[in-house]
Image (cartoon, grey):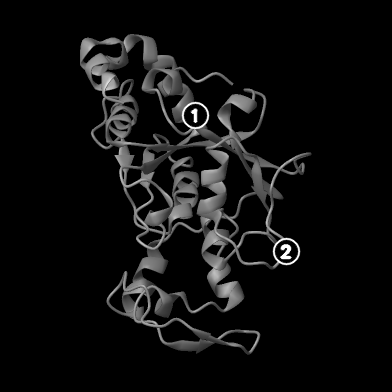
């Protein structure tokens, strides 16, 4: 699928389509069942041209399963996320093993603060077996695309946030919720259920920021909003001298 947005923004990382399907891809990279892995790293690999995919046995870690829309993987695994995101320490997992979290990630002051975050988190259960991430250029409009996921710099992010409001005139064209690097997927799945979905700015996860250049953030939109933004490109600010000046410094 051609993307006028990607061409006009001159993106370094190709946009990726998040596809929900019951058909296992013929080619692609997948975690081994039960093995630890980072979903954010897999998504980054997809922006470089690879197809990656996940199911309920191959999501890398509980936070990754949550981010991909496989439900509350923290509770199912008995994972001590309240302590990991705050003060750390040692906790016993369901399998009887002790899990040493050291000083914790200190994203929250205390386990009780993390519990409050969990109460607000939009856990989702996708209705399909697989979630596939692949370059947008490799899909068609007939594919069951749920989201489009970008990794962009400040100028390009500014353009995407602005373009998201081109047809609507809404003030809040995007939101910036806090979560793990991969959890923008779950936030965007939640947005897709709104009458007027917003884009999701992400990759604020301090523990994973080292995986991307310092000027990169993610932007994830429900496919319906993406299609609306694509159709707006020729008539928008992207055809003006103001954008041309910014594009020169890409």
> Between residues 130 and 137, which one lies in front from this camera angle?
137
Quadrant where the N terminus sits is top right
Residue 85 seen by the camera: yes
Left/right of residue 25 with respect to residue 5 in the rendered view: right
Residue 128 seen by the camera: no
Q: Residues within 10 Å of mark 1 (few under 14, many from 20)?
A: some
Q: Position of residue 113 (x, y in %)?
A: 31, 74
Q: Position of residue 43 (x, y in %)?
A: 54, 46
**Residue tagged 2:** 33
Residue 127 lies, with reference to residue 246, above or below; the image says below
**Residue tagged 1:** 224
Q: Nearer the viewer, mark 1 or mark 2?
A: 2
Left/right of residue 66 with respect to residue 139 in the rendered view: left
Quarter of the figure with residue 101 = bottom left
Q: Earlier in the sequence, mark 1 or mark 2?
A: 2
Residue 91 lies, with reference to residue 75, above or below; the image says below
Residue at 74% over, 44% down: 22
> Between residues 94 and 42, which one lies in front from this camera angle?
42
Label 1: element kind: helix
Quarter of the figure with residue 78 = bottom right
């Amino acid at each position: 699928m051609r993307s006028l947005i990607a061409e006009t923004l001159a993106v370094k990382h190709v946009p990726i389509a998040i596809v929900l399907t019951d058909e296992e891809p013929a080619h692609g990279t997948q975690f081994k069942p039960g093995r630890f892995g980072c979903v954010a790293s897999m998504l980054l690999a997809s922006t470089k041209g690879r197809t990656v995919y996940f199911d309920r046995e191959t999501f890398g870690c509980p936070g990754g399963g949550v981010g991909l829309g496989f439900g509350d993987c923290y509770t199912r695994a008995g994972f001590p996320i309240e302590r990991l995101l705050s003060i750390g320490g040692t906790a016993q997992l369901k399998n009887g093993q002790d899990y040493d979290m050291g000083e914790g990630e200190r994203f929250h002051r205390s386990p009780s603060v993390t519990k409050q975050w969990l109460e607000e988190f939009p856990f989702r259960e996708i209705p399909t077996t697989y979630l596939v991430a692949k370059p947008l250029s490799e899909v068609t409009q007939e594919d069951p695309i749920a989201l489009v996921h970008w990794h962009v710099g400040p100028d390009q992010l500014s353009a995407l946030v602005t373009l998201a409001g081109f047809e609507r005139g809404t003030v809040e064209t995007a939101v910036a919720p806090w979560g793990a690097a991969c959890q923008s997927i779950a936030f965007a799945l939640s947005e897709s259920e709104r009458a007027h979905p917003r884009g999701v700015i992400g990759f604020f996860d301090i523990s994973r920021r080292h995986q991307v250049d310092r000027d990169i953030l993610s932007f994830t939109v429900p496919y319906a909003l993406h299609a609306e933004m694509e159709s707006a490109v020729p008539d928008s600010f992207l055809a003006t001298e103001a954008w041309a000046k910014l594009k020169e410094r890409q």
